[in-house]
């Protein structure tokens, strides 16, 4: 077994194991209590914040090693068949234990509960619903108790469906959501395997897709292991890319789920249309079938959600998280009105540099490349960025990098390092429950180191992009 393969397998195994141990130990500063009910199991041991922080840091760092090892191994021709089995087992186990790393799943459960009982999660915050006494809605943790839903109406309807399954139990509601995410992840894995089976040379595309998306240890833990809505949106977005050329109707439905869960995932539509135009295969009938399929799902969902559906989204657009390039500038006095133009500028720069490198190959790869370029620019330049938001990037990148030059793989390594260090900034994950020492270390890293990690990643992507663009022009 070559060294990169050992890194890939060993790093991924340690990453998944450490994350699972944190989850199974029970409520902590990394995992909020779920109460009684059927679903994910834990031992109820209430480990200390220091214990779970060390284990989660080990998980994240090992995941970064596993991801980089996978990139190096596949670059040398590795076919990760058994590795995908390891990842599949890990994904299944992650759904048998409580989510770790944030309390977002409690908000999903609350929004679904409000909708299922006839309320409006887009105008009624959890702490105001049913006088603040509802057993599910009242479980939301600070600082989100008084925050209305920021998620799209399709995602909102799926949250309501999980609430119907879970009833009065937070644990069962959350578990239904976890199972839904696992099914979405498994569907992408199966469809990706089938679509890429006859593409490329000797399974190279399948290998890249497997290690960068399906079996990416950081996406499995931070995303699926955290039960984030981005898993659903990211899986649907990748399905739209995979199915666009074969079935515009199914692709439209998948796109509706993606953008109807989180708006930024609509960038996939841009990639699909750009690729079709460049391949001179954009026909009115193809476009109309895809658009109508998306609208059949999106229009009723928006009518159900009502006029308040994007109120919280507009409010959130002014937020600035700690580990971003904009945080030091805002604290130094930069007007927030410049955040959106600044993000657009970063997207433009990254797109200009990396477009000729990643947007190449067949129709699927070009659509994925265009999506990945815009997504990378958005994530590098966003004012509010959390590690699980990277579900927007890694699926399209996995589909594009196989046909890109060697410089594209260097971009993957830089983005893998960025995701690792960004995820490390959000260990253990909850606002409360940390000891003073753990809180000082966690928030200190997030506030003092995180922004410079973001800046280093942005500058590296720009610098390598200049070099990669020149090499492509010469060749």
Image (cartoon, rainbow, N blue to C red):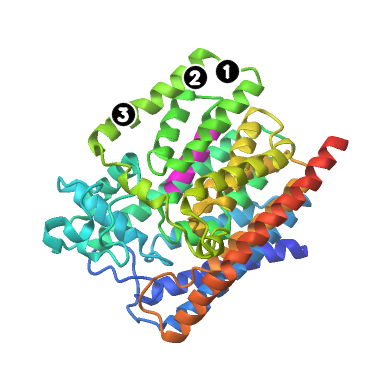
Q: Residue furthest top?
A: 284
Mark earlier in primary sequence (2, 1): 1
* Residue for badge 1: 282
Residue 413 visible in the displayed image: no
**Relative to residue 140, is residue 55 drawn left or right?**
right
Of the 4 image quadrants, the one containing the N terminus is: bottom right
Majority secondary structure of magenta residues: helix
The quadrant in which residue 279 appears is top right
What is the magenta range? 231-241
Residue 352 - label = none
Q: Residue 287's mark?
A: 2
What residue is drawn where x is 48% and y is 44%?
235
Q: Quadrant of residue 178?
A: bottom left
- In this rendering, the answer to whether 50 lies above or below 275 is below
Q: Position of residue 369 (x, y in %)?
A: 64, 37
Q: Residue at x 18, y 55 (%)?
A: 167
Say which residue appears at 44% left-offset and 28% top-offset.
Answer: 252
Q: Please report whichever mark, 3 or 2, sits nearer to the chain's N-terminal start.
A: 2
Q: Provide the residue designation for mark 3.
A: 299
For the residues bearing labels 2 and 1, Cβ distance under 8 angstroms: yes
């Amino acid at each position: 077994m070559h060294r990169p393969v050992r890194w890939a397998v060993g790093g991924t195994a340690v990453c998944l194991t450490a994350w699972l141990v944190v989850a199974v130990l029970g409520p902590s500063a990394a995992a909020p209590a779920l109460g009684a009910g059927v679903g994910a199991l834990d031992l109820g041991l209430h480990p200390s914040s220091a214990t779970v922080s060390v284990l989660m840091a080990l998980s994240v760092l090992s995941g970064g090693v596993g991801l980089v090892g996978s990139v190096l191994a596949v670059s040398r021709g590795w076919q990760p068949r058994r590795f995908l089995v390891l990842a599949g087992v890990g994904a299944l186990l992650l759904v048998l234990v409580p989510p770790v790393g944030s309390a977002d799943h409690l908000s999903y459960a609350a929004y679904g509960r409000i909708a299922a009982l006839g309320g409006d999660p887009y105008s009624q915050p959890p702490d105001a619903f049913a006088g603040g006494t509802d057993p599910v809605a009242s479980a939301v943790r600070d600082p989100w108790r008084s925050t209305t839903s920021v998620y799209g109406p399709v995602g909102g309807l799926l949250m309501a469906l999980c609430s119907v399954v879970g009833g009065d139990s937070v644990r069962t509601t959350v578990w239904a959501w976890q199972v839904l995410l696992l099914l979405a992840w498994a569907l992408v894995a199966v469809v990706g395997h089938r679509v890429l089976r006859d593409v490329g040379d000797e399974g190279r595309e399948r290998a890249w897709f497997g290690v960068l998306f399906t079996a990416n240890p950081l996406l499995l833990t931070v995303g699926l292991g955290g039960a984030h809505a981005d898993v659903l949106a990211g899986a649907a977005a990748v399905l739209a890319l995979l199915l666009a050329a074969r079935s515009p109707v199914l692709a439209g439905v998948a796109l509706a789920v993606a953008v109807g869960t989180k708006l930024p995932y609509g960038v996939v539509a841009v990639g699909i249309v750009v690729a079709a135009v460049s391949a001179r295969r954009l026909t009115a009938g193809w476009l109309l079938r895809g658009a109508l399929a998306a609208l059949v799902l999106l229009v009723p969902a928006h009518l159900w959600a009502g006029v308040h559906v994007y109120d919280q989204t507009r409010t959130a657009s002014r937020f600035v998280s700690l580990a971003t390039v904009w945080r030091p500038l805002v604290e130094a006095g930069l007007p927030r009105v410049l955040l959106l133009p600044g993000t657009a500028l970063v997207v433009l720069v990254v797109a200009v540099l990396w477009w000729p490198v990643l947007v190449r190959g067949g129709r699927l790869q070009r659509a994925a490349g265009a999506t990945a370029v815009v997504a990378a620019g958005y994530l590098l330049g966003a004012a509010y960025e959390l590690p699980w938001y990277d579900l927007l990037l890694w699926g399209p990148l996995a589909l594009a990098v196989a046909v890109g030059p060697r410089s594209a793989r260097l971009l993957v390594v830089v983005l893998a390092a960025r995701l690792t260090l960004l995820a490390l900034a959000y260990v253990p994950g909850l606002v409360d429950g940390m000891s003073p020492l753990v809180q000082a270390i966690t928030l200190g890293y997030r506030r003092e180191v995180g922004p410079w990690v973001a800046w280093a990643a942005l500058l590296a992507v720009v610098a390598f992009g200049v070099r990669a663009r020149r090499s492509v022009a010469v060749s």
